[in-house]
Image (cartoon, grey):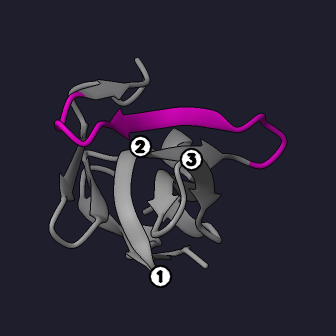
């Protein structure tokens, strides 16, 4: 069974930087898109960034130019570099991946457990 393990969340000051990691584990044949959603208290979950296996990216307008998604295809791991975070970026960040398991012909969407990012001075 494929799992996603997130790390790197925590407290960061406005204008600082933080990097989130999302590592996959399990019997994986291939990973297609990976990305990040976030959910702030009282708000709906929103897409933050998406990155394809070919490293094409898309971002929410609110993070464009500040956050950078990247991935290591050899490790099936995705990263979200958060630069110049703002208090409104405070949320639980969830990573996801479209994964094809060994022996399967289908891609399934797998989610991480979430990691809290708090932007505050």
Nearer to the camera, 39 or 50: 50
At x 60% / y 58%, what residue is drawn? 110
User: Does 26 sit left or right of 43 as displayed?
Assistant: left
Classify 10 Å Cα crowding around label 2: few (below 14), some (14-19), many (20 and above): some
The part of the chain drawn in magenta is 41-56
The residue lying at 15 percent from left, 68 percent from top is 74
Residue 5 is situated, as x and y percent measured from the top left of the image, at 49, 78
Residue at label 3? Answer: 106
Q: With respect to residue 56, does 121 lie above or below?
A: below
The residue to which callout 2 is attached is 86
Marks 1 and 3, Cα distance to the nearest angstrom?
Answer: 15 Å
Outermost right residue? 42
Q: Earlier in the sequence, mark 3 or mark 2?
A: 2
- The residue identified by callout 1 is 26
Q: How far, Cα to Cα, is label 3 from label 2?
A: 38 Å
User: Which is more N-terminal, label 1 or label 2?
Assistant: 1
Q: Nearer the viewer, mark 3 or mark 2?
A: 3
- Residue 82, position in %: x, y? 29, 51
The numbered mark, 1 or 3, whose residue comes first in the sequence reads: 1
Q: Nearer the viewer, mark 2 or mark 1?
A: 1
Residue drawn at (33%, 24%) of the image: 58
| Quarter placement of the N terminus | bottom right
Q: Is residue 82 left or right of residue 26?
A: left
Q: Residue at x 61, y 50 (%)?
A: 109
| Residue mark closest to the camera, 1 vs 3 | 3
Q: Quadrant of the C terminus?
A: bottom left
> Quadrant of the rendered structure where residue 44 is?
top right
| Magenta region, main secondary structure | loop
- Up the image or down, 115 lies above or below 1; here it is above
């Amino acid at each position: 069974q494929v799992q996603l393990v997130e790390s790197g969340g925590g407290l960061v000051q406005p204008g600082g930087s933080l990097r989130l990691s999302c590592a996959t584990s399990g019997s994986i044949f291939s990973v297609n898109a990976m990305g990040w959603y976030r959910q702030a208290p009282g708000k709906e979950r929103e897409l933050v960034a998406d990155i394809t296996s070919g490293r094409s990216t898309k971002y929410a307008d609110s993070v464009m130019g500040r956050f950078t998604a990247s991935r290591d295809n050899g490790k099936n791991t995705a990263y979200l570099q958060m630069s110049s975070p703002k208090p409104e970026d405070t949320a639980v960040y969830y990573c996801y991946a479209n994964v094809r398991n060994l022996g399967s012909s289908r891609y399934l969407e797998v989610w991480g457990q979430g990691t809290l990012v708090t932007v505050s001075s």
